[in-house]
Amino acid sequence: MSNAPLFNFDNSYARLSDSFYALVPPTPAMSPELIQFNQPLADSLGIDFSALSNEEMALIFGGNTIPEDAEPLAMAYAGHQFGNLNPQLGDGRAVLLGETIGKDGLRYDIQLKGPGRTPFSRSGDGRAALGPILREYLLSESMAALNVPTTRALAAVTSGEFIMRERMVPGAIITRVSRSFVRVGTFQFFAIRDNPEALKELADYVIARNYPELEGSDAPYLALLNAVIKRQASLIARWMQLGFIHGVMNTDNMSIAGETIDYGPCAFIDEYHPEKVFSSIDREGRYAYQNQPAAGHWDLCRLAEALMPLLDEDREEAAKLAQTAINEFPPLYTAYWLTGMCNKLGLTEVQDGDKELVEDLLERMATNKADFTLTFRHLSDALSGSDERDQPIRDLFTNAADFDGWAVKWRDRLQQETRNDNERQQAMYQVNPIYIPRNHLVEAVIRAAEDNQDFGPFYELLKVLEQPFSQQENREQYALPPKPEQEVLRTFCGT
Ligand code: AMP
Ligand code: MG
């Protein structure tokens, strides 16, 4: 192996106070083998692995070879899990290798997930199973292609070990890339320990790294709170516009940088219903599809509480400032959501009555068990309206007349805008994907890999998901909803 530093790490988190992390190397995997390396992502990060063999790369991404400028550590954080505060979580099955500066000049965390136990592992084994690792790889890369802020997948390896879950399953490790793995729970960690110095240190770090435009502002910590609220409002609106259910919106899984993080039992909706839940651990539907904006709002209230000591010395004044900031979430979210939904319908401007138009469509989709993704995609082809053009959408509705009734109102509304149909259609194609990582497709990938060591279906699906907005030849089956016998009703954390 060459001696040039591979990542050119510059590890700013490791320079923070000791209480922020535990220095801990990854536990070497038994016999790591490379499943996938994300070359385009590596290129954008300025990481050059071209001199390395697949075996050498597997050793790095398996945690066996520590790159020379890495300073492996597990980050400390707390968090509310399903509403209950856990004061001590932290990276129990993840190790931050270091930080690299991308070609865009921005700083990125490079983290192994599944590299063995850390001081924060509690009773867990610190390992991750192959199924959830493939799921995270596919879903996070799909989200990136769908233009949703997200952590990325740089590489995945099998560990060569079997680990105990509901049964013995193959182990794997994913290397994730993020603008920062600091979470709402990281702020909570110091707030509940009554440590305002550390809280300030963390806030200053986040501002310098992720919100540099706020540096030097009169009230930087209030500005930080407002900025995080804004990013999360925008992020959750994007999820809702794509039928994405995160599944575990605990405060330790909410990113301060505004990315989608910690892909667990997440899933995309096929048949639309607002109360949809896939996660096996979400028994009360706390993180159901339609509850996500409220869950995000709740998590941000916890962030506001944690930041209070930095907002004002006077507790009452701090509470007032926090409350005012938090009150901005619902209108911000609604504005982001509505603008995006209008774009999905081919509208450039939001007018009075548009919210009702969108809600009316969603209600009809729910009653008629219409496929979320295909309904919107087919709308782009049905702009001018004719029996032939409407038929693909009508076929998605149990009672086609329900679509017809809505389409009359929609086409009336389109008349009030000036774009021609061709322009409008092109714009709609850019926001209404054909290909999403449907649960039954992801499940088939996992079965092939786990049962037959066959990664072919994984590579195929990954390729399709890289171009979610363009029709791909001979890939029709990837656009289709599941047949009843293919439907996945439950998704599991299981990492
Ligand atoms: P999650 O909400 O799934 O992202 O994880 C919640 C907490 O559990 C985090 O602190 C994880 O690091 C920890 N955790 C989850 N699975 C394991 C495992 N297999 N070993 C150790 N810690 C784990
Ligand atoms: Mg987590």
Image (cartoon, grey):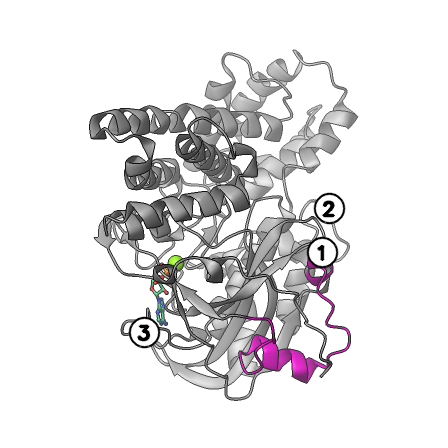
Whole-Å distance between the Cαs marked 3 and 2? 42 Å
Name the residue located 28 percent from the left edge and 71 percent from the top edge: 122
Q: How many residues crowd mark 3 within 10 Å: few (<14), some (14–19), many (20+)?
A: few
Q: Earlier in the sequence, mark 1 or mark 2?
A: 1
Q: Earlier in the sequence, mark 3 or mark 2?
A: 3
Is residue 458 visible to us here? yes
Residue 379, given in percent of the width and then of the height, sits at 63, 32
- Ligand 1 within 8 angstroms of badge 3 C-beta: yes
Q: Earlier in the sequence, mark 3 or mark 1?
A: 1
Say which quadrant the N terminus sits in.
bottom right
Camera-side mark, 3 or 1? 1
Whole-Å distance between the Cαs marked 3 and 1? 34 Å
The residue wearing badge 3 is: 124
Q: Is residue 83 left or right of residue 443?
A: left
Say which quadrant the C terminus sits in.
bottom left
Amino acid identity at mark 3: Gly
Q: Which mark is residue 44?
A: 1
Q: Is residue 320 left or right of residue 274?
A: left
Residue 224, given in percent of the width and then of the height, sits at 44, 35
Amino acid identity at mark 1: Ser
Camera-side mark, 1 or 2? 1
Residue 223, given in percent of the width and then of the height, sits at 44, 30
Above or below, comparing residue 138 to residue 386 in the picture? below
Amino acid identity at mark 2: Ser
Name the residue located 33 percent from the left edge and 36 percent from the top edge: 310
Dot 3 falls on a residue whose secondary structure is loop
The magenta segment: 42-70
Dot 2 falls on a residue whose secondary structure is loop
Q: How many residues crowd mark 1 within 10 Å: few (<14), some (14–19), many (20+)?
A: few
The residue wearing badge 2 is: 470
Circles 1 and 2, Cβ within 8 Å, touching? The answer is no
